[in-house]
Each structure stands twice: as structure tokens, then as C-alpha cells.
Image (spheres, grey):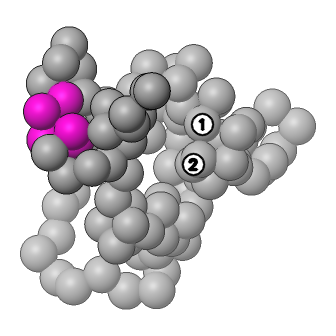
Amino acid sequence: MAKHKTTSSTPATDADDEHIYSTEELLAILPWDRSTLWRKSRDGSYPKPIQLTASRIGWRRSAHRAWLKQREENPIEARAYFGRGAARLKAEGDGPLARDDR
């Protein structure tokens, strides 16, 4: 018999927060590939996994949610790509584009 995931419209509980995401589950909800997930976990820009067994790791849902909340409270500024945003940076006097190299 196949296992089916059920969704619930009930509010999240503490037990829901302690769900452990597998690598595959995280890759399904994050816009990253496997190498990006590992790089961000290693450099500290995403929570580190926990060792569950000798051959399995996982990430706590609560750690993932805390990371999301931090991203919402302290958003990362978007980079200016191919000159987009350059005029705004220069007009606001921010960044290297505003320097007057004399």
C-alpha cells in the first residue's frame, strides 16, 4: 500500500515545528540545488543539518522557519544586475557608484 501525505488546515503546533526535513524535502521547497543547500549550510547562511543516524541527516522545521523569519525581518538587498539599479544607487549616494574618484 502506498503512503499518502495528508494536509491539514489546523494551526501549526510545537510538534509540527519539530518535523525533520530530509534533503529531498528541503530541495522541493527551496529554490536551490543540492550544492547550494550544502554551501549555505557550511558557510552559516542557512541552518546546519543534524545527524540523525550514521547515514541520515535532516533539518528541523523550526530552524528553517526561524531562518525564513530572519530573512523577512532582515531582507538581503538585491544586487544591481547589468546596470539596473545603478541610477538609483548613484542618485541615493549609496555604494561604489556614488563615489567621486578624483
Residue at (16%, 70%) from the top-left corner? 8
Q: Residue 40 bears which disc, if any?
A: 1
Q: CA distance from mark 1 to mark 2?
A: 5 Å
Question: Residue 41 in the image: x percent, y percent?
Answer: 65, 41
Amino acid type, residue under disc 2 in the picture: Tyr
Residue at (54%, 41%) from the top-left corner? 22
Question: Is 77 displayed left or right of 90 in the figure?
Answer: right
Q: Residue furthest right?
A: 54
Dominant secondary structure (helix, strand or loop) of the stretch shown in magenta: helix
Q: Residue furthest top?
A: 82
- Residue carrying label 2: 46
Residue at (68%, 48%) from the top-left corner? 44
Q: Residues within 10 Å of mark 2 (few under 14, many from 20)?
A: some
Question: Is 93 displayed left or right of 26 in the figure?
Answer: left
Residue at (18%, 18%) from the top-left corner? 83
Indicate which disc, 1 or 2, sits on the residue closer to the N terminus.
Answer: 1
Q: Say what secondary structure mark 1 lies in.
A: helix
Amino acid type, residue under disc 1 in the picture: Lys
Q: Which residues are magenta?
A: 85-90
102 or 34: nearer the viewer: 102
Q: Say what secondary structure mark 2 lies in.
A: loop
Above or below 11: residue 57: above
Q: Residue furthest front?
A: 102
Q: Is residue 87 magenta?
A: yes
Circles 1 and 2: CB atoms closer than 8 Å: yes
